[in-house]
């Protein structure tokens, strides 16, 4: 199959490598938007009611839950925008997705003492997302050879 449509050919024909790459990229974009939506909800619940989450006690990275709420809310909003950019095949989407997934993974790791189950679930999804986005690089030709 060819990757370009031409007269008499199927304009939607793609080779199997490109189809696999686009499928994985679409998965990553949708997954990022879903994870980011969950982060938005996590942030809103921390902002709305400070006693929703457990007391972290003597935690090294302890912060006011309102601060954590804003962190999760902002990461979530940016993540939804980048997820939409990935699905729309924007060039900035893949790199932006990796950056936001790394930041969200770190934020969720630091949030573990407040809500362990949820934070570890989002951490695992962020790591899956990082894998999905970085595995796309092997399918791209090098610019300078």
Image (spheres, helix red, strand yellow):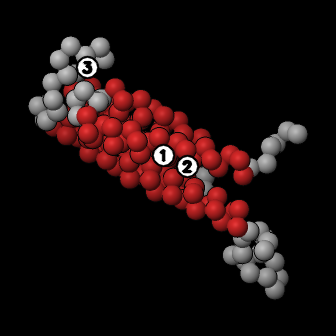
Q: Element under label 1?
A: helix
Q: Residue at x 46, y 57 (%)?
A: 30
Q: Is residue 2 above or below residue 140?
A: below
Number of marks in the rendered image:
3
Query: Residue beneath label 1, please?
Result: 128
- Tags 1 and 3 touching, CB below 8 Å: no
Q: Residue at x 30, y 29 (%)?
A: 111
In what quadrant of the picture does the N terminus appear? bottom right
**Residue 20 position within the rendered picture, expressed as x and y whole percent measured from the top left:** 64, 62
The answer to which of 110 and 5 lies nearer the viewer is 110
* Cα distance in 3D space between marks 1 and 2: 6 Å
- Judged left or right of residue 24, residue 42 is left
Query: Does the image show residue 117?
Result: yes
**Residue 37 position within the rendered picture, expressed as x and y whole percent measured from the top left:** 34, 49
The answer to which of 78 and 114 lies nearer the viewer is 114
- Judged left or right of residue 135, residue 140 is right
* Cα distance in 3D space between marks 2 and 3: 31 Å
Query: Residue beneath label 2, please?
Result: 132
**Residue 45 position within the rendered picture, expressed as x and y whole percent measured from the top left:** 19, 40
Q: Which of the 4 image quarters holds residue 21?
A: bottom right
For residue 63, the mark is 3
Nearest to N terminus: mark 2 or mark 3: 3
- Tags 1 and 2 touching, CB below 8 Å: yes
- Judged left or right of residue 21, residue 2 is right
């Amino acid at each position: 199959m060819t990757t370009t449509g031409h007269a008499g050919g199927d304009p939607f024909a793609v080779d199997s490598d490109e189809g696999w790459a686009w499928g994985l990229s679409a998965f990553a974009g949708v997954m990022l938007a879903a994870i980011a939506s969950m982060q938005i909800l996590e942030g809103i619940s921390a902002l709305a009611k400070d006693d929703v989450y457990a007391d972290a006690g003597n935690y090294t990275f302890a912060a006011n839950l309102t601060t954590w709420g804003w962190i999760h809310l902002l990461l979530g909003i940016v993540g939804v925008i980048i997820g939409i950019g990935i699905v729309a095949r924007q060039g900035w989407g893949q790199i932006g997705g990796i950056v936001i997934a790394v930041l969200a993974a770190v934020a969720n790791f630091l949030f573990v003492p407040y809500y362990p189950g949820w934070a570890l679930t989002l951490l695992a999804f962020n790591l899956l997302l990082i894998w999905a986005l970085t595995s796309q690089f092997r399918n791209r030709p090098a610019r300078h050879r």
